Image (tube, grey):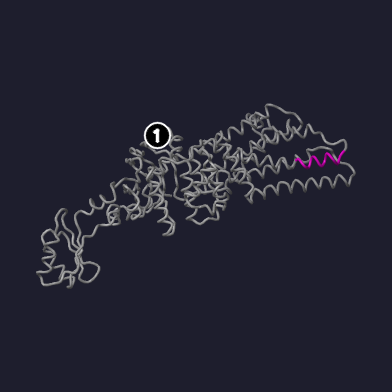
Amino acid sequence: MIQAEGLTKFYGRHPAVQGLTFDAEAGEILGFLGPNGAGKTTTMRILAGYMPPTSGSARVAGFDVVDQSLDVRRRVGYLPETVPLYPEMSVSEYLTFMGSLRRVPNLDERVHEVIEEVRLEERADSFIGNLSKGLRQRVGVGQALLHKPEVLILDEPTIGLDPAQIIEVRKMIQELGRERTVLLSTHILSEAQQVCDRVLIINRGQIVAEDTPANLQAQLAGGERLRVHAAMETHELLDLLKKVPGVTRAEPGESEGVVELASAPGRDIRPLVARRVVEGGFDLLEMRPVGISLEEIFLELTREETSSEGEGVADA
Amino acid sequence: MRNAWIIAGREFHSYFVSPVAYAVALMFLLILGGLFAAQLYVGVQFGQMTPDGRIVIDPLVTILLFATPAITMRLMADEQRMGTIELLLTSPVRDWEVVLGKWLGAMGFMLILLLATWVYPLILHRLTSPGIDQGILVSAYIGLVLMAGAMVAIGVFISSLFNSPVAAFFVTLLVLLFLWIVGIFGRGTGSGSELLSYLSFVDHYYGNFYQGLLDLGDAVYYASLTALALLLGSQVVEARRWR
């Protein structure tokens, strides 16, 4: 549904995105994950037909974003990061305006439907300028849904919302993703983990990793991790377990008597660890595998860049 | 083209919820009304009055010079400042349709203002005998509408260059002032004098329309200036995408 081929965009001499190649299948929720300034917004603007790339090409729903921009725009619903709306219009006026630009058939009825869909029935006649940020976000989402687009591009859809609203928007996205292709950007990792079928991690305009959230975890964790809790002092436990064959690293855990172990992939060290503790004459209280979180993967992948990165041009 | 009308409709409506628009309209009609009342007062004092609708037109032209930038300043600049332009430009709408729509919407408001000023010549007509020359008045108003069209188009173009309505206001005012006075430099016999006097905004108005003459050449001048400014505006919108 979306195919990007070597997408590159320069702002002056500053490269916002460089050689981005990826695709999204129909009915897939693809997450764009990256720190601020990574080039997420730029990429989404290119795909939504707002700006052409400096080089490279992209096709959305089978149409080229530069040569067939109008065809692309007809099939895309786009929610920009800042959700720009006209404050002096009411919700239903605004949706009617956007819908008429998009030639939505049976417009009045459709506007009504969308208002119900994003649950703004009670505020349909309120001026947008008087709505809270969360409600405005819903108006923005409503605007993107009006013409029942095949592709939805949502730039940071949960930014600035309170926790209850975030959960609501995520649920909405998951529902929407059943029938359409959704491309969504976020810098919140748990969001990507929870909502997306596939995640693209981008940093400084380049893709640094691409996979399902689960695979990313497995692939980047580089082996298994084990948390061991025994009724003994941490340093004793450390000394005891360091020598277990297969253990690549042993670190003190967050509380007394807890140690975290890393082992080579595909090697189960649990029986050995259990035996060593018990044979040492101590009580083994708990032992469980720890998954490496997306947070850690993310930090790992973007580490060297974040220290030198100061500019946020791409997401500005 | 339908899109341009949709955008124009929204723009036109937004004038009626905008305090700036009301302020402009108030200033427009208040100054004009004040001057008109003063003329009447003087006329009554001396027991005579020139039965000429143009006593309203003269100050109107000058007020337009200041009112137009105020009407057009936010058209594109505000969209660019607030980011709403992003949703317009990702709708299936061509860039020129956006610019044309803005112009049409502002012209709608402008026409209402001009229509409202018609009340003064009508009063004058009732007060004097045998009344005023309606032909000259109609001709003068046709010229005024054409001139206002060009001024609004220039305003739209300049507004598209800025993210700040205030900046757009002052630059538009400057450009209009320049077009206003450029004819003066054309009065001489220098090499470019013919071109300069052709460019002059006011000469095309006072030369014929104001005298009651509908001249095609002057209409073409204003129409081509309008078209040129709108074209430039569309180019700016497109260029902003490539930025």
Q: Residues within 10 Å of mark 1 (few under 14, many from 20)?
A: many
Q: Quadrant of residue A64?
A: top left
Residue B130 x/y as whole percent: 87, 35
Question: Residue at horizontal 35%, vertical 48%?
Answer: A32
Question: Where residue A181 sits: x, y (%)?
Answer: 37, 42
Q: Provide the secondary structure element on which disc 1 rests.
A: strand
On screen, residue B98 versus residue A167, left or right, reads: right
- The answer to which of A276 and B12 lies nearer the viewer is A276
In the rendered image, which residue does mark 1 sit on? A64
Quarter location, residue B194? top right
In the image, is residue B126 part of the stretch drawn in magenta? Answer: yes
Q: Chain of mark 1?
A: A
Q: Quadrant of the C terminus of chain B?
A: top left
**Residue B243 visible:** no
Q: Is residue A172 visible?
A: yes
* Residue B66 at x, y percent in the picture: 67, 45
Q: Is residue A193 left or right of residue A313?
A: left
Q: Is residue B45 above or below residue B237?
A: below
Name the one closer to the observer, B186 or B124.
B124
- Measuring from the top left, give residue B33's x and y in whole percent: 77, 47
Would you say the magenta stretch is mainly helix, strand or loop? helix
Up the image or down, B216 lies above or below B177; here it is: above
Identify which amino acid the numbered label 1 is placed on: Asp
